[in-house]
Image: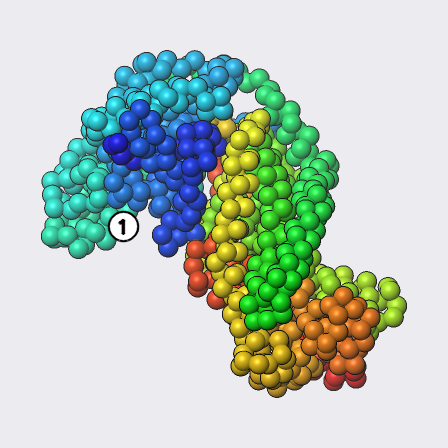
């Protein structure tokens, strides 16, 4: 099993794995600053479980289930 | 006076609009980019001896055209004449903000950087050496505080100075040895390929990234024979970078940013809990999140419609008094009828919505500026996405539709992508607005004695409308907009204290747009309906012999299978397009009853309809063409007649089929 952002516990931090997300989504996320090798913290989950709020490089992003599961961690 | 044109670019939530509002004040013009649903804001002001035009580009994280928003910004920077591009960046998020800055510099734009919110960044523990940053980047940097308005004069001065001496900063950028080398190769392969004002290096980077637009232009250029060589270079590089080339460029840009950061920025050490974190722990809490969300929505709804109502009545009374005067001075005649029935009846009635539009957009602007709108979307996104494939941000426009579809449609501007905006706009007319309530009241009272039955039917109609709205949005999102699978990445910006100025400006701007619309589309159509009701000359207003009556008669057989195949129903429905509540008073007019003679109208309706055809008629009025004001709003917001017409066809089609099923189905089941 590959560990993804979706597997993190609220408050937990991990490192984004190299070349994990491909396609437009990958490009979009990368341009937003989700680059390889940087720490990502799962801040919290929405009351209904999704989206999740992650913190990278000092700012917060909301990601849906699909996107959260697409980001692989080390 | 010399004229200058500046473009204002930046990420969302960096205070770009605040800079724009501070500089241009009331001298703003809001419209759409030609042929796009994207808002175009421009404004002007004079400074020293310059007349400066400023264009506020959409908030973007990058210039890669994922959606129309980025496309618009990129086109403006490359293809529109401009004297400088002012890039507003948020000091607290400097790393991510610089990504856009680098992309703007790549286009060869005459860039000026406005460093905003430096105080917040310093509070959070950042140390930014502005002088050093300016030296490394090479572009002028001005520290501003958009909220307080400090540094803005300096910013404009710097931009003017830059405009006198336009500089292309693209050659200062490096992507690392390997990429730079190949960029130069590609440059020499396509010497004749020009894209707007962009330098050759930008064109080369885009060709290597595989940008569709630039590749198409290359196909048409005289260098098209070299495309094969380009493919070879790309293959070669893909081998080196282990796959995707455009990602290699992204990493290269972030690599450059990292080296800039190392030299000029000290990041805070350790993480301390910010006020935003504290608020979010409550506002998005597992148990409190949804109740707080519902409470805030309820408050917006309540304030908008309750506080607005007395003002609405006031305007309404004003029109009544004005109508009285007109009748007194001009007497009963063609001119007074045109003014009273046509103009005041149509436009006047719709202008009563103005107070609620003012209040609503004041409130929406406040919660957006505070930062709650993003949290509201965060909390409700799962429901909206599961049900209709829309973002959580679509919840507010939808729910506002219960009050008035026009406000709902106008607030689709808060949605961040086009497909969500259009799908929401198409769905809102099916949500039962408050103007339909008098119709339900009249018909349920006429046919169902039991108040409980009346309530259940009314409630059922509301739910039914919502179900149709959900289906329409879902179908649109998964068919027309299926391939526009924009990933859901939404920033949750830090909470900020809103400024009154921007809320008031926003309120005024939306209200003004509405007045403009009322003066054009709505006036035109109202007068048209009036003419139809008064021609041929000499007929009684809206009677069976008037064109409207004739139209009603033509439509009668069409409506017969739905259970209301008589001309009066047709006429009421035509008038109902002006405003849905007019359906009720039309029945009164057609039977020469006083407009407020409710008992009389109920009696008339009771004679003409059966319980089953009444339900069929109510469902039809719920679903058929939205009122002119709503249609005008769709035209305005989608910036196209196409979507307005689609909405008309969609509404009529769905209304007809549904009523047909209800009436014929009902008959088969033995109801009458």
Image location (x, y in percent) of residue B277: 61, 25
Image quarter of residue B328:
bottom right
Report whether B36 appears left or right of B456: left
Up/down of B278 relative to B80, above or below? above
Report whether B548 appears left or right of B44: right
Does any portion of residue B608 appear in the rendered image? yes
Query: What crowding class fits label 1: few (fewer than 14 Cα within 10 Å), some (14-19), or many (20 or more)?
Result: few
Quadrant placement of the C terminus of chain B: bottom right
What residue is shown at x 66% (from left), y 52% (from top)?
Answer: B318
Up/down of A2 relative to A12, above or below? below
Does any portion of residue B382 appear in the rendered image? no
What residue is shown at x 74% (from left), y 84% (from top)?
Answer: B668
Image quarter of residue B653:
bottom right
Query: Which residue is outermost to the right?
Result: B450
Image location (x, y in percent) of residue B600: 80, 73
Q: Is mark 1 on a helix, strand or loop?
A: helix
Front residue of B240/B182: it is B182
Q: In this figure, which residue is indicated by the disc labeled 1? A: B213
Image location (x, y in percent) of residue B352: 63, 52
Image location (x, y in percent) of residue A43: 59, 30
What residue is shown at x 43% (from left), y 39% (from top)?
Answer: B28
What residue is shown at x 66% (from left), y 77% (from top)?
Answer: B569
Front residue of A34/B648: it is B648
Query: Which residue is outermost to the bottom?
Result: B557
Quadrant placement of the N terminus of chain B: top left
The number of numbered discs placed on residues in the rendered structure image is: 1
The chain to which mark 1 is attached is B
* Colour setup of the view: rainbow
């Amino acid at each position: 099993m590959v560990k993804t952002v979706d597997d993190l516990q609220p408050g937990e931090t991990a490192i984004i794995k190299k070349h994990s997300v491909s396609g437009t989504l990958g490009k979009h996320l990368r341009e937003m600053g989700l680059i390889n090798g940087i720490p990502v913290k799962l801040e919290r989950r929405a009351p209904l479980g999704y989206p999740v709020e992650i913190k990278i490089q000092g700012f917060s992003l909301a990601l849906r289930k699909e996107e959260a599961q697409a980001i692989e961690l080390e | 006076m010399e004229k200058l044109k500046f473009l204002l670019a930046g990420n969302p939530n960096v205070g770009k609009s605040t800079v724009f509002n501070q500089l241009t004040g009331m001298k703003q013009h809001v419209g759409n980019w030609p042929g796009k649903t994207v808002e175009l804001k421009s404004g002007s002001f004079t400074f020293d001896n310059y007349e400066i035009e400023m264009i506020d580009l959409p908030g973007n994280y990058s210039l890669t055209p994922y959606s129309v928003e980025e496309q618009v910004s990129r086109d403006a920077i490359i293809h529109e004449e401009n004297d400088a591009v002012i890039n507003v960046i948020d000091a607290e998020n400097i790393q991510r903000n610089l990504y856009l800055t680098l992309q703007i510099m790549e286009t060869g734009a005459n860039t000026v950087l406005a460093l905003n919110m430096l105080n917040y960044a310093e509070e959070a523990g950042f140390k930014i050496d502005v002088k050093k940053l300016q030296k490394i980047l090479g572009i002028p940097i001005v520290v501003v505080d958009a909220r307080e308005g400090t540094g803005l004069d300096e910013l404009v001065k710097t931009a003017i100075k830059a405009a006198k001496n336009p500089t292309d900063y693209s050659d200062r950028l490096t992507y690392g040895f390997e990429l730079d080398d190949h960029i130069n190769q590609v440059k020499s392969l396509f010497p004749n390929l020009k894209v707007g004002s962009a330098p050759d290096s930008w064109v080369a980077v885009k060709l290597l990234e595989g940008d569709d637009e630039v590749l198409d232009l290359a196909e048409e250029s005289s260098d098209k024979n070299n495309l094969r060589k380009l493919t070879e270079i790309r293959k070669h590089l893909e081998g080196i970078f282990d796959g995707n080339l455009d990602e290699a460029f992204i990493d290269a840009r972030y690599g450059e940013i990292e080296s800039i950061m190392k030299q000029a920025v000290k990041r805070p050490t350790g993480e301390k809990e910010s006020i935003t974190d504290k608020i979010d722990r409550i506002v998005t809490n597992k148990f409190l999140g949804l109740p707080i969300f519902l409470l805030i929505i309820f408050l917006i709804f309540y304030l908008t419609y309750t506080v607005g109502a007395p003002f609405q009545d006031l305007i309404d009374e004003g029109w009544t008094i004005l109508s009285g005067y007109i009748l007194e001075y001009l007497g009963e005649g063609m001119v007074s009828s045109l003014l009273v029935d046509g103009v005041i009846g149509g436009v006047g009635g719709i202008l009563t919505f103005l107070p609620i539009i003012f209040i609503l957009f004041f409130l929406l602007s406040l919660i957006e500026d505070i930062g709650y709108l993003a949290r509201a979307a965060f909390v409700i996104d799962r429901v909206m996405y599961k049900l209709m494939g829309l973002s959580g941000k679509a919840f507010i426009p939808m729910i506002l539709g219960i009050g008035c579809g026009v406000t709902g449609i106008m607030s689709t501007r808060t949605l961040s992508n086009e497909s969500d905006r259009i799908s929401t706009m198409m769905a809102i007319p099916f949500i039962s607005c408050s103007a339909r309530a008098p119709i339900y009241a009249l018909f349920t009272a006429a046919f169902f004695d039991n108040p409980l039955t009346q309530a259940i039917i009314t409630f059922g109609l509301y739910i039914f409308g919502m179900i149709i709205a959900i289906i329409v949005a879902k179908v649109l999102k998964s068919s027309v907009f299926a391939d526009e699978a924009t990933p859901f990445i939404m920033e949750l910006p830090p909470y900020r204290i809103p400024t009154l100025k921007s809320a008031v400006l926003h309120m005024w701007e939306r209200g003004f747009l509405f007045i403009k619309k009322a003066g054009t589309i709505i006036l035109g159509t109202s007068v048209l309906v009036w003419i139809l009701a008064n021609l041929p000359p000499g007929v009684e207003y809206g009677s069976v012999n008037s064109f409207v009556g004739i139209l009603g008669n033509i439509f009668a057989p069409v409506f017969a299978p739905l259970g209301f195949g008589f001309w009066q129903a047709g006429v009421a429905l035509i008038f109902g397009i002006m405003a849905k509540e007019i359906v009720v008073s039309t029945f009164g007019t057609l039977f020469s009853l006083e407009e407020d003679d409710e008992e009389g109208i109920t009696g008339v309706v009771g004679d003409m309809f059966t319980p089953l055809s009444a339900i069929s008629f109510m469902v039809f009025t719920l679903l058929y063409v939205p009122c002119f004001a709503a249609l005008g709003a769709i035209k305005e917001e989608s910036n196209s007649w196409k979507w307005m017409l689609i909405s008309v066809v969609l509404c009529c089609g769905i209304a007809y089929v549904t009523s047909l099923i209800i009436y014929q189905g009902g008959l088969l089941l033995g109801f009458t």
